[in-house]
Every structure is written in C-alpha cells, then in structure tokens.
Amino acid sequence: MEKDAVSGVGIVRRDSDGFDAADVFSRSKAVLTGSLGNLIEWYDIYAYSAFSLYFAGAFFPQTDPVAQQLAAASLFAAAFFVRPLGSALFGYFADRHGRRNALTAAVLLMCFGSLLIAATPTYASIGVAAPVMLAVARLLQSLSQGGEYGSGATYLSEVAHPERRGFYSGIWYMTLIGGQLLAIVVLLVLQKAFLTPDQLKAWGWRIPFVIGALLSIFAFVIRRDMPETELFEAAKPTIRLENPRRLLLRDWRAVALVVGITVGGASAFYTYTTYMQKFLKLSVGLDDSQTTLVTAGTLVFALLLQPLYGAISDRVGRRPMLIAFGALGTLGTVPLLTSLRHTRSPLAAFLLICAAWMIVSGYTSIAAIAKAELFPTAIRAMGVGIPYALTVAIFGGSIDSVALAFKNAGDEAGFFWYATALIFVSLLCYIFMKDMKTHSKMELSA
C-alpha cells in the first residue's frame, strides 16, 4: 500500500481496469471530505426554500399566501444573479491559489449570510428594512455558492480516480442533494417534535439558519486541512505564465457548451427540489407533514441514484447518459407534472417524483465531471463555475418564481411546457457534443 499524492491517504494501486475496495474507500473519503462544505452550503440555500412557507409572511406584507411565496421566490431568484460574480472571484482564486483556499473562503462567507437571515427582524418590526436585510443575506449566500460549485467540481474531478470520475461525481452530487435532505429533516423534526405551525411562523424558522451558520464554521475548520490536488500542484509553473482571460477566450466553445449542458438539467433539478415542496402544498394539496415526508422520501431516492448513474457513465460514457436524460425529459416532463398535479395521494406523488428522478439523475450524477473535463487545469474552476452560474441564475434559480407566476396567471400547465422546452435545448447540445470521457482535458495544464 502506498500513500496517494492526491487524497493524502493510503490506497492500493491497480491498473486502469482493476478494482480494489481500499482504493474506492480512500478516494470516496477524499471526495466526501472535500464535499462536506458543499452539503452545508446547499443546506443553507435549501433552508431558505424549505422554510419560506413559514417566514414569507414575516418579510412580505401581502395577505395572499401565493403572493407571499412569489415574493420570497423572486428574491431567491434575484440573488442568483450575483452567483456569476462569486464564480468569477472564487474561480480565479481557485485557479491561481488553489482549490482548498477558495473552498475554505466560500464556506466562511456562507456562514455570515446564514447568521444575517437568522438575526433579521420582521417587517412588522422595522418595515421595508426587513426584506432589504434579507436580500443582503441572500446576496452573500449566492456569492458563496457561486464560488462553491466551480471550485468544488474542480476539486472533485482532480482528486477522483481517472477511470471512476463518474462514480465520484455521483458521490459529490449526493452531498448536494443531501444538503436539501438535511434541510427537510430539520423541518420535519421541528414540525413533528418541537414546534407548532404558529411557533414556526413566529420564530422557529430562524433555527435552521443558526444551524447552518454553525455547520459552516465546522466545514471551515475541516477544509483548512484538506490536501491540495496533484493536478493543480503540477500545473503551478504553467499557471503563473498564462493569462486566464486569454485561455477562457480560447476555449469559448467549451464555455458555451457548459451553458448548453446546464440549461435543461438545472431547470429540471430546481423543479424537483426547491419548487416541488411548494407544488405539493399549493397545487397537489398535501398538508405540511405530507409535503415534508414526500419531499424527504424522494430526496433519499434521488441521493441513492447518483453514484449508481455515475458508475454507469464510467462504462458507457457521459454523452449517452445526458442524451437519455434529454430525450426522456423532453417526452416525460409534461405527463409527469400533469399527473402529479391531478393526484391527491401522497404515495402516488412520491412514486411520480421518483420516476422523474430516474430521468433527471442522468444529468445530475455526472454534470460536475462532464463540465470539468472540458477545461485544462489552469482555468477549470472559472471555466466550470462562471457559465454554470450564469445559466443557473437565468434558468435555475428563477424556476420557483416562473412556476408561481404561471400559477398566479391561471396557466400552471404553461410552466410544464416551459420546463420541457429548456430540456429540449440541452438535448440538442448533448446530441452534437463529444463524449468527454474519451475527450477529456483533465491532464492538460493549459
């Protein structure tokens, strides 16, 4: 057994076709250590979405619950537009000074954002200053999250075994989904064991943001001791000589492809995560407990699919998985969401959302690695993060507000076709792209 220069732990080396449980364990440990902050960052983001059903009235004075949720969702979406700035700042820092340093700084910024939400007074106390403070907190969170995705996906791709990057991409995405699951579990525990609905609306909604701030501090401590990746260390001499702006312009096709890959996948992901809880409550008609249980159950199912689908991509390639998602998503989104809207059964809702996740996981499980493989080491964090953040700001974070706007206008089905159209756009990109498993730029310095 030798010590792995990338993960810093002992592994058993095998040839490219070999397999060893110790190797899988050690690399999984490295990925999970690097992804812990990812889970916590996404927990903080999803806590806003999950608990907005309770705190929207504290910040927005409208009397109509749908209008309150639309206001909260619009703020959630607007904050996404600073994510590209976060991706640019943290991505540049990661590509110049190391992935570990960028990830450590990002999670610390998330801590400040969560604390500010927890401490912000209500509209009844300070008037319009309340939603303004909430907006500032969301901007800090979005800056942090903008840096997290590109730097995190880069760290994952560089620490993973070359022949099993899809599998480790799935493990990394487990932590992303796990962040939302943790937020839902916190909500479920508060609902069932500690607080009444009135207490949650009055002050209980602040608890998850205090938890998020404390978890961010823990992640900061853990990330300080993460090893830097071998690929970044090897590329340092080249990185010092290259102009990142010039490299990004040279690889503009890869930047554009990240946008194409992300459009449909991000819209589908946010439809079945942040928006689904509101959809189950406002459209399907489930009560608070049923909504939380169904959401939690489907997230567990989705979480288990990620490494499985990622491992399949290591065998068949990234492109076939993406095409399968694009084709099935284009054909199945309207029937699935229509059936879901008309059911009143929690079990039927659970099964329908699980069916949707069997489609969406073709994107989510390998999205990070498929994008990271498009760029050389010198610009990988920026190349992944900036176009991804721009796309998610427009087509991902806006999903809640777009869907609620369609519902408010009395044309909820229009949103189903909107989501389908975005997936179809990505399908066209998948059909004409190269398979990055066999055309990867991971080993290139610049």
Image: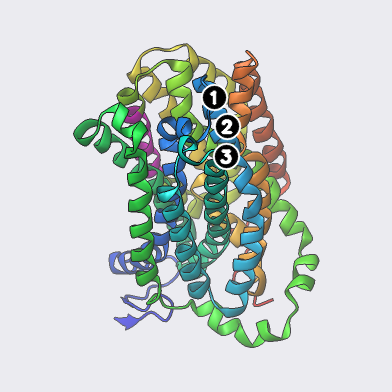
Quick one: quadrant of the C terminus? bottom right
Is 224 displayed left or right of 326 in the figure?
A: left
Q: Could you tell me which residue is drawn at 37 percent across and 31 percent down?
A: 295
- Give the answer, above or below, for where 259 lies relative to 101: above
The residue lying toward the viewer, choosing from 338 and 61, is 61
> Which three-letter amino acid code belongs to the residue tagged 1?
Gln
Measured Cα–Cα span from mark 2 to mark 1: 9 Å
N-terminal of the two: label 3 or label 2? 2
Query: What secondary structure predominates along the stretch shown in magenta?
Result: helix
Magenta residues, start to end: 292-305
- Distance in Å between CA atoms under marks 3 and 1: 13 Å
Q: Which one is earlier in the sequence, the residue at label 2 or at label 1?
A: 1
Q: Quadrant of the N terminus?
A: bottom left
User: Where in the figure is residue 328, as x and y percent of width and height?
Assistant: 57, 30
Residue assigned mark 2: 71
Q: Specify the amino acid type for callout 3.
A: Val
**Where does label 3 land, which residue?**
128
Residue at label 1? 62
